């Protein structure tokens, strides 16, 4: 009975799987794996070994519809579109993609043709564009060049029209086309008059076809970088906020996906110093009723909201008669670290050197708050520090760590005399660079 049940489960598993059958003649007795995408993450769908002739069979989940990466030692990675097909792949020359052949896969055959056609067009268009002004006085040649240029520009569009819109490859190619279009946008006017803005606003981040495309990170980063390039600083924040709102609205019914995108975009914007759009994300996520943020993510968002640049930082009691606020220095550089923290250890000598140099130039004090729980270890490690150090032995439960929503060490915050936050510093050298501006 037990054997029968196991056999039944095995049969059921195979019924729920599709296969990729292939032969890579130069990949013999080697690992080969198939990787899918879950939003911003890549994960293994299947793994096997090639035999002595390079043959392999991979089973992938039937319900996975999206892009995947086929990886093997000695060969370049291959994009394979998965949409419920039993696919055959042959590749004789691993250095030449022209020898890569798909069989029994409408999805991948169309994609392969689209890539080849696009590459051919991209070679011809620059050459035609270069020749056109050279023949401006020769009417016949000029007309031929114009007609050929127009023909090349419509070839790929005409090809896309032949693809059944129900196929996954149709939406995947359109998504890739939008990403490629970003490179051609150079000015605000070009952006406003392009299809790109509409393409972004119509991106359904919650659609599994998009979520499993492997293109979300590239799409977001490239789009935000394009906004940086074409919009002046006076209007950039507004455009970034509009861009954020697209995925905030689209993912409102899927809190887990929303948290993943929110964390990624927040970190990107915060690192760039875009306060308003980063605050928009933090506030939206903290006010979300159907999204249970993990402790670390919630702490990051709360820290940003409470400790945003321009806000007043909490006071820190250093001793009975001394606190952060009553220090008279023009600038105060607060450092959260620990003797056991590897990055804190590697940055510590730099802090000492930079402190000495800055002390000769400006009125600044460093205040090193340790989250050590072993006070003796703290005292032994920091006994030679030339700046103020403090440790109450309570670790992450110390009042300062709680007030500053500390979630990582080292953390560096530059503030003025009145504890107004001026900048969040990534490393000690960035502090020195800040005062050299």
Image (cartoon, rainbow, N blue to C red):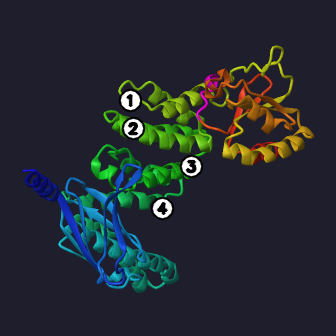
User: How far separated are the C-alphas under marks 4 and 1?
Assistant: 38 Å
CB under 8 Å between discs 1 and 2 = yes
Estimate how packed mark 1 is, as few (under 14), some (14 to 19) or many (20 or more) residues with alpha carbons within 10 Å. some
Q: What element carries label 1?
A: loop
Q: What element carries label 3?
A: helix
For the record, the magenta segment spans 402-407
> Does 344 appear in magenta?
no
The mark that comes first in sequence, 1 or 3, is 3
User: How far separated are the C-alphas under marks 4 and 3?
Assistant: 14 Å
Q: Position of residue 57 (x, y in %)?
A: 24, 71
User: How far separated are the C-alphas under marks 1 and 2?
Assistant: 8 Å
Residue 78 falls in image quadrant:
bottom left
Residue 430 in view in this figure: no
Determine the main secondary structure of the stretch shown in magenta.
Answer: loop
Q: Which of marks 4 and 1 is in front?
A: 1
CB under 8 Å between discs 4 and 1 = no
Label 1 sits on residue = 291
Q: Which of marks 3 and 2 is in front?
A: 2
Label 4 sits on residue = 184
CB under 8 Å between discs 4 and 3 = no
Q: Is mark 2 on a helix, strand or loop?
A: helix
The mark that comes first in sequence, 4 or 3, is 4
Q: Is residue 105 left or right of residue 299?
A: left
Q: Is residue 141 left or right of residue 62?
A: right
Label 2 sits on residue = 258
* Image height of 400 relative to 227, above or below: above
Q: Where is residue 224 in the image (x, y as percent from the top left)?
A: 51, 48
Residue 193 in view in this figure: yes
Label 3 sits on residue = 228
Rendered residue at 86%/38% (across/down): 384
The mark that comes first in sequence, 2 or 4, is 4
């Amino acid at each position: 009975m037990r054997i029968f049940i196991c056999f039944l489960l095995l049969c059921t598993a195979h019924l729920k799987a599709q296969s990729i059958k292939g032969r890579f003649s130069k990949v013999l007795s080697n690992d080969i794996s198939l990787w899918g995408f879950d939003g911003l993450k890549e994960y293994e769908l299947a793994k096997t070994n090639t035999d002595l002739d390079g043959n392999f069979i991979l089973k992938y989940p039937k319900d996975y519809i999206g892009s995947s990466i086929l990886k093997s030692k000695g060969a370049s990675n291959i994009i394979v579109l998965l949409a419920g097909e039993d696919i055959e792949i042959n590749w004789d020359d691993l250095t030449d993609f022209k020898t890569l052949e798909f069989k029994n896969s409408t999805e991948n055959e169309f994609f392969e043709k689209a890539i080849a056609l696009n590459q051919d067009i991209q070679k011809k268009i620059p050459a035609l564009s270069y020749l056109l002004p050279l023949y401006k006085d020769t009417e016949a040649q000029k007309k031929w060049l114009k007609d050929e240029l127009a023909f090349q520009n419509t070839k790929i569009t005409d090809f896309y029209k032949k693809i059944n819109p129900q196929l996954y490859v149709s939406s995947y190619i359109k998504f890739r086309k939008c990403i490629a279009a970003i490179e051609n946008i150079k000015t605000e006017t070009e952006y406003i008059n392009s299809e790109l803005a509409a393409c972004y606003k119509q991106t359904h981040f919650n659609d599994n076809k998009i979520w499993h495309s492997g293109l979300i990170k590239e799409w977001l980063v490239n789009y935000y970088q394009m906004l940086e390039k074409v919009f002046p600083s006076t209007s950039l924040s507004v455009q970034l906020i509009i861009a954020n709102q697209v995925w905030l609205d689209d993912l409102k019914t899927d809190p887990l996906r929303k948290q993943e995108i929110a964390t990624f975009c927040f970190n990107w914007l915060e690192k760039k110093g875009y306060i308003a759009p980063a605050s928009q994300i933090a506030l939206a996520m903290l006010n979300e009723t159907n999204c249970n943020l993990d402790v670390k993510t919630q702490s990051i968002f709360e820290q940003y909201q409470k400790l945003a640049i321009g806000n007043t930082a909490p006071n820190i009691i250093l001793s009975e008669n001394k606190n952060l606020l009553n220090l008279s220095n023009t600038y105060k550089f607060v450092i959260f670290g620990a003797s056991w923290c590897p990055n804190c250890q590697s940055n510590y000598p730099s802090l000492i050197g930079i402190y000495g140099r800055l002390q000769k130039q400006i009125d600044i004090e460093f205040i090193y708050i340790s989250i050590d729980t072993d006070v003796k270890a703290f005292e032994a490690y920091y006994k030679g520090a030339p700046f103020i150090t403090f440790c109450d032995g309570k670790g992450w439960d110390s009042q300062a760590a709680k007030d500053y929503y500390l979630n990582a060490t080292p953390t560096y915050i530059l503030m003025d005399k009145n504890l107004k936050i001026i900048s969040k510093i990534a490393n000690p050298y960035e502090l020195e660079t800040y005062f050299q501006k």
